[in-house]
Image: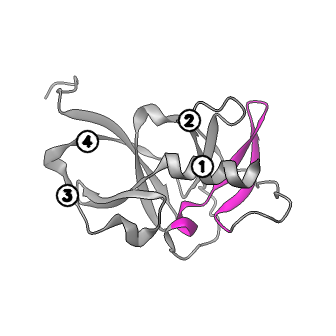
């Protein structure tokens, strides 16, 4: 099998959460860093916004995606990581969002033949754009635009 992508393939990354996983385009992931305890945001933030972490001379918001979907939140484990993802809105004040991970993510090749839609993503809330099965694994596709807008409303 060729290592080159066919025109109908996209490189993706499965981000392992504490209760499920996210599928994002590989180009959306900037870096995976070790877990660091977030700094609190003056008490006005929702449960899914854990606080901010310092990275690349910036305070980056750290999100618990499980909380957004209504899944039960589990304690942070020893293998926890943070996925630093690029934002899509071009906001120079907040170009990154951190997503709390259970462990190290892994690359996947996304092709129509390996994905299967699963139900209505709306049952998981407005920040989930899709719910699917990829290669036998269940995953959510985050709606980064909605997430970024929510963060703007909270942090500005």
Q: Secondary structure at mark 2?
A: loop
Q: Which residue is mark 2?
A: 89
Q: Secondary structure at mark 4?
A: strand
Q: Which residue is mark 4?
A: 110
Give the alpha-carbon distance from disc 2 to disc 1, as whole Å.
9 Å
Eye-nearest disc, 4 or 2 = 2
- Measured as percent of width and height from the top left, residue 120 is found at 30, 68
**In this orientation, which residue lies closer to the viewer: 4 or 128?**
128
* 120 lies left or right of 47: left
Q: Identify which residue is drawn at 46% across, 56% down.
A: 16
The answer to whether residue 100 is seen in the rendering is yes
* 11 lies left or right of 4: right
Q: Which residue is mark 3?
A: 116
Q: Are marks 2 and 1 in contact (CB under 8 Å)?
A: yes
Give the alpha-carbon distance from disc 3 to disc 2, as whole Å.
29 Å
From what the image shows, is residue 4 above or below residue 11? above
Give the alpha-carbon distance from disc 1 to disc 4, as whole Å.
27 Å
* 73 lies left or right of 141: right
Going from N to C along the chain, the mark reached first, 3 or 1, is: 3
Determine the image quadrant of residue 12: top left
Would you call the spot at circle 1 few (<14 residues within 10 Å), some (14-19), or many (20 or more)?
few
Give the alpha-carbon distance from disc 4 to disc 2, as whole Å.
24 Å
- Measured as percent of width and height from the top left, residue 44 is found at 80, 64
Going from N to C along the chain, the mark reached first, 3 or 2, is: 2
Image: magenta residue range: 47-68
- Measured as percent of width and height from the top left, residue 75 is found at 64, 70
Going from N to C along the chain, the mark reached first, 2 or 1, is: 2
């Amino acid at each position: 099998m060729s290592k080159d992508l066919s025109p109908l393939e996209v490189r993706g990354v499965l981000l392992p959460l504490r209760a499920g996983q996210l599928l994002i385009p590989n180009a959306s992931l900037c870096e995976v860093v070790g877990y660091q305890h977030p700094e609190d945001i003056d008490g006005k933030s929702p449960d899914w916004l854990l606080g901010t972490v310092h990275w690349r001379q910036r305070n980056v918001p750290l999100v618990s995606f499980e909380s957004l979907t209504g899944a039960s939140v589990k304690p942070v484990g020893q293998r926890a990581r943070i996925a630093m993802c690029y934002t899509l809105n071009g906001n120079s004040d907040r170009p990154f969002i951190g997503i709390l991970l259970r462990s190290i993510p892994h690359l996947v090749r996304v092709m129509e033949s390996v994905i299967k839609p699963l139900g209505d993503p709306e049952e998981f809330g407005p920040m989930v754009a899709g719910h699917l099965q990829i290669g036998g694994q269940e995953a959510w596709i985050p709606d980064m635009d909605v997430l970024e807008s929510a963060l703007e409303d909270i942090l500005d």
